[in-house]
Image: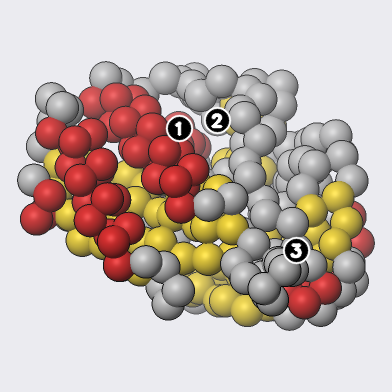
């Protein structure tokens, strides 16, 4: 099984770690009562941190992608070092595979806090700040205690996607399987772009670009944002997200009305997912 696991390491990660990761992942997969294919592991570093010997990585980011009984799954974990990263990613993979093969069930809320490695001025170009925030159910966002750089940040990664037309239930299940905290899709019942995202009190919330009523007989315990997504330019969205120290923001393009998600990457930079026209 180990030879079927592809491991990709970024510069600075020991080549010996690839063999360890391959063996640990193969052991998890070998004990599963499921067909597991297309196993890909990526290991990289997060930011830089001051050390007696000079600047070094502030943390390790590990991601596993696979197909389990024909369904795509993804697990992503950040950790302080390679040993912790491997422990987290193997346990996360085991839990995700069990969840997919045993039938979907709502994930507990609140979930354990995701690790974000502190950013230094050398890594971000600005001081880091971390302020605990409560959930903001009406803004299409969730606020959590994370260390974020202060001030406006550039968008360092952009994705344009043909959004899948699916029910909010299906979107929530995809969000769980792919280890996302927010998932952008098109709701066929209203023909509007929408998101499901992780926030209290149930752990799942639905927001659309245009305000609409709740879906009929959802299997997922969804709460509903009563307002449509705000229409914002990219600059306005960045300003709102950074000023409020939010992990992500759902908004609509002022010209097309299509949905977009601005989000924080593990390294503190910003990413943008936009619906393809």
For marks 3 and 1, give the one nearer the viewer: 3
For marks 2 and 1, give the one nearer the viewer: 1
Q: Earlier in the sequence, mark 3 or mark 1?
A: 3
Residue under numbered circle 1: 169
Whether pointer 2 and pointer 3 mark residues with C-beta atoms closer than 8 Å, the reply is no
Residue 101: x %, y % from top left: 24, 26
Q: Is residue 152 above or below residue 210?
A: below
Task: Locate residue 58 relative to residue 22 in the image: left or right.
Answer: right
For marks 2 and 3, give the one nearer the viewer: 3
Residue under numbered circle 3: 119
Mark 2 neighbour density, 10 Å: few (under 14) some (14–19) many (20 or more): some
Residue located at (20% from left, 61% from top): 6
Residue located at (59% from left, 58% from top): 59
Whether pointer 2 and pointer 1 mark residues with C-beta atoms closer than 8 Å, the reply is yes
Residue 182: x %, y % from top left: 58, 47
Given the current orientation, which residue lies at the most extreme front position?
A: 52
Which circle marks residue 215 in the picture?
2
Spatial CA distance of label 2 from label 1 is 9 Å
Task: Locate residue 186 relative to residue 256 in the image: left or right.
Answer: left
């Amino acid at each position: 099984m180990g030879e079927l696991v592809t491991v990709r390491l970024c510069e600075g990660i020991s080549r010996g770690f690839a063999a360890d990761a391959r063996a640990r992942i193969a052991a998890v997969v070998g004990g599963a009562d499921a067909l597991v294919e297309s196993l890909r592991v990526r290991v990289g570093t997060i930011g830089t941190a001051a050390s007696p010997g000079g600047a070094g990585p502030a943390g390790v980011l590990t991601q596993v992608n696979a197909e389990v009984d024909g369904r795509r799954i993804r697990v992503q974990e950040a950790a302080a070092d390679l040993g912790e990263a491997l422990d987290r990613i193997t346990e996360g993979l085991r839990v995700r595979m069990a969840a997919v093969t045993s039938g979907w069930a709502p994930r507990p809320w609140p979930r354990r806090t995701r690790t974000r490695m502190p950013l230094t001025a050398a890594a971000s170009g600005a001081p880091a700040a971390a302020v605990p925030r409560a959930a903001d159910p009406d803004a299409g966002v969730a606020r959590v205690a994370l260390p974020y750089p202060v001030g406006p940040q550039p968008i360092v990664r952009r994705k344009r996607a043909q959004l899948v037309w699916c029910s909010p239930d299906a979107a929530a299940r995809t969000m769980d399987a792919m280890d996302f905290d927010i998932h952008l899709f098109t709701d066929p019942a209203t023909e509007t772009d929408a998101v499901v995202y992780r926030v209290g009190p149930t752990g799942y919330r639905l927001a659309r670009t245009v305000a609409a009523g709740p879906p009929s007989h959802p299997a997922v315990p969804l709460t509903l944002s009563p307002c449509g997504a705000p229409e914002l330019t990219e600059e306005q969205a960045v300003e709102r997200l950074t000023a409020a120290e939010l992990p992500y923001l759902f908004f609509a393009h002022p010209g097309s009305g299509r949905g977009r998600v601005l989000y924080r990457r593990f390294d503190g930079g910003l990413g943008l997912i936009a619906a393809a026209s």
